[in-house]
Amino acid sequence: MVIGWILIGAIVLGVLWGVAAYNGLVRSRQELKSAWSQIDVQLKRRHDLIPNLVEAVRGYLTHERETLEKVTQARNQAVRADNLKDKAQAENFLTQTLRSLFAVAERYPDLKANQNILVLQEELTSTENRISFARQFYNDQTMRFNTAIETVPTNLIANLTGFNKVEFFEIEDPAQREVPSVKF
Amino acid sequence: MSFTFVEIEKSKTHTITGLFWTLVVLYLISTYALVWSFRLFLGASLQGSFLQILTIVAIALLAATIHWFFSTYQLVSRMLVAVRARSLDPGDTYHARLKNVIEEVSVAVGGSIVLEPYVISTPAMNACAVSDFSGRSAIAVTEGVLARMNRAQLESVVAHEATHIASGDSLTKSVFCGLFALHEEALKRFSGLFSSRSGLDLLLGRTGVWIAFSLMILWIVHAARRLCEPLISRQQEYRADALAVRLTRDPLSLAEALRLIAGHWRGVGTYGESLSAIFILDPGIERLSEKEGWQADLFSTHPPTEHRIEILLGMAHVGQDEFDSRRMQPPQYHQDPVPSRVPQPSGSDTRWFVWLDGDWQGPWPLERLSELGTLKPDTWIRQQAQAKASPAYQDPFILQMLQTRYGYSGPVAGITPRICPRCRVALTSVLYEGVTLDECPACRGCLVNRDQVSRVLIREEYSFSDSITRLAQTIEAIANPQRVAKRYGDFPFSAMKDQQCPVCGASMVRKFYTLAYLVEVEQCWMCGLTWFDRDELELLQCLYERQVPEDRRAV
């Protein structure tokens, strides 16, 4: 009789724990979604800034049409990308082309004097930082989520209810980990 | 160390509850003491009935609750007023950078908290964070920090403050300051009124009584604050440093920033030292803050700065010696000369004689005058038929012609522009040291308010031309502020009848900017706007910078 009660108690406790763990997982998945939308917002900010930047420097960089075109192209590609992998790839490519644009711009001292471009430079630096911060936050959340669904005992609930591991938003080449330094 | 803010939230509510109950106990003790002394005075028995004790407890609870709500109501705005914070100037590039940095950091903590950016208009160096129960949070940074720190250092300071807000330390500290420090500051100002023997003194007569009374309350509030200080742990600063590094991944910049702040005036005197808990470094250099031990742990709100830097250097794997030697390197100056400021986007048959090269020349029609580059707003002109000569700006046709020449094409969106008090030409907006100023396109003088002057003074984007440096040296060599002060008294000025303030229309007064910096300027006696003639602002800036020792300048 007593053992029966203990068993029933244990089962009830187990079910309660299971519900709590499931809710916790759902919550962190929601947090992941909002972290991802933050990256999206910042990426969009960058996409919106780039046409302005290209327009502003076009007058100075008359001999660098190719570089400018590449940036525009990379930007359009990044806007079109929809799944995570493509997006990461396109954004990496965009970062690369931006970096080459800034390297080229180093050679034009006139650019330094232009106030509009200095303002744009500040905005772009800020956007690059925001993207990397948003990515950092997203990856931190991803790590917490992945750890939760792979460790005992939450992995039982995760397997039962079909939670899958989430990919990191990563930059593949470690040499590119640094934010491009935006300097004219 | 956990970075989920829900978990940290729990410890924060404990401290806040603790603060409330301490307040209740304080009121209980004081009510009881009052009743007790009253009875003693009347000669009644000291034994109170149960009902009486209950009443005392109820009164104490009520008083504490009233005190609590009164003190935490609109806490953020009141704290911001107390530290003299102002909202950002949209035309200022340094402020734009601060806004961006704060938004970046808010992205880094997950984007769930809105951080309002503010600046404190002082050349001192410090930063603070405040929040209240309504969920409002603000970060305020001094102009000194904006001018002297690079982006990475600013970012780490803001990150430190943001983690204070996110972890709820800032709420606890703000409530703590709201309960006692804000009242203490107000009382200090109140008793300061008497000690300076001002008008109130004459008004009230019995000064001594008032001083004694306000000092007594001041002492009680002060004692209460000291009593509650152990609830504010100095460990919170270590934790905020660590969390800030976790956000920015840049411990070295935070170490540099702390060193920079520690080496400068931290603003004691500008904002009350009883508010020190909310700042990144203690504004007053309190000896206790720099000490270890249980007493310091209990009663100090900030841990030793050197120890904080040591921990950060440990994270960055940089040795103390290496760090110190880096600091000793002479700072890199921008060697660009002052650029000519680039303006930014903001008829009849009569003939005139123009006074050029010591002779009347002409008469010329308006079209010819417009081609005459040497014609300035203050050049003497005379209409053909008249004998009276006047400055060019007094003639409406010529003034209009000059306006067009300087790129002014009529009021934009119905806003009449500010007019140069000398040339009567519309002023244009220019950017100098990151501040948007109104400059006259003709005489290159500029109109600046006090806030903007203090910003320009501490920023060092451009070096000065040789002539300005020489002029500054001459002024330093021959000027004797004491003698000037003796001769002119506190207000060396003479009113300029024909020069009006471009904004409020009151007359401008000619005076030295301050007796410490003998640069003559025109100042509006109503609104305090200052007119600097060409190069005078640079001269003032040069004089100011020459007073700052080499190793303290912006890096």
Image (cartoon, coloured by chain):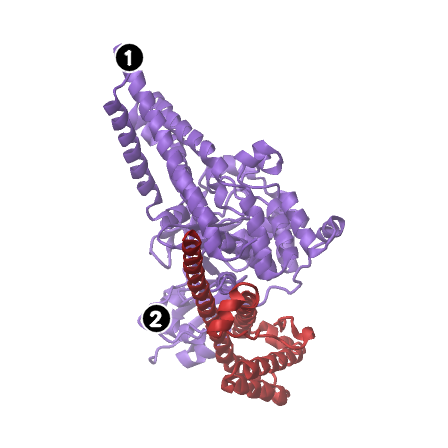
Chain colours: A red, B purple
Q: Looking at this view, is A108 or B25 the one in front?
A: B25
The kind of residue tagged 1 is Phe
Residue B45 in percent (x, y) is at: 27, 12
Left or right: B502 as drawn, with respect to A67: left
* Label 1, residues with CA under 10 Å away: few <14, some 14-19, many ≥20: few
Outermost residue toward the front in this view: A1
Expressed as whole percent of the image width and height from the top left, the position of residue B481 reads: 56, 39
Against B540, residue A152 (above or below) is: below
Above or below B90: residue B167: above
Chain of the residue that carries numbered disc 2 in the rendered image? B
Image point (30%, 34%), residue name: B61
- Horizontally, residue B24 falls left or right of residue B162, namely left
Among the 4 quarters of the image, the one containing residue A146: bottom right
- Label annotation for residue B89: none
Query: Which residue appears farthest toward the left when viewing the image?
Result: B51
Q: How many marks?
A: 2
Residue A143 in percent (x, y) is at: 57, 67
Q: Horizontal and vertical percent for residue B233? A: 52, 41
Kind of element beneath mark 2: helix
Please give the name of the residue rendered at 32% of the width and 23% of the height, measured from the top-left corner: B32
Q: Is residue B455 visible?
A: yes
What residue is disc 1 on? B41
In this view, the mark in front (2 or 1): 1
Which residue type carries mark 2? Pro
* Quadrant in the picture for the C terminus of chain B: bottom right
- Which numbered marker is on residue B396? 2
User: Marks 2/1: CA distance?
Assistant: 84 Å
Image height of A47 relative to B130, above or below: below
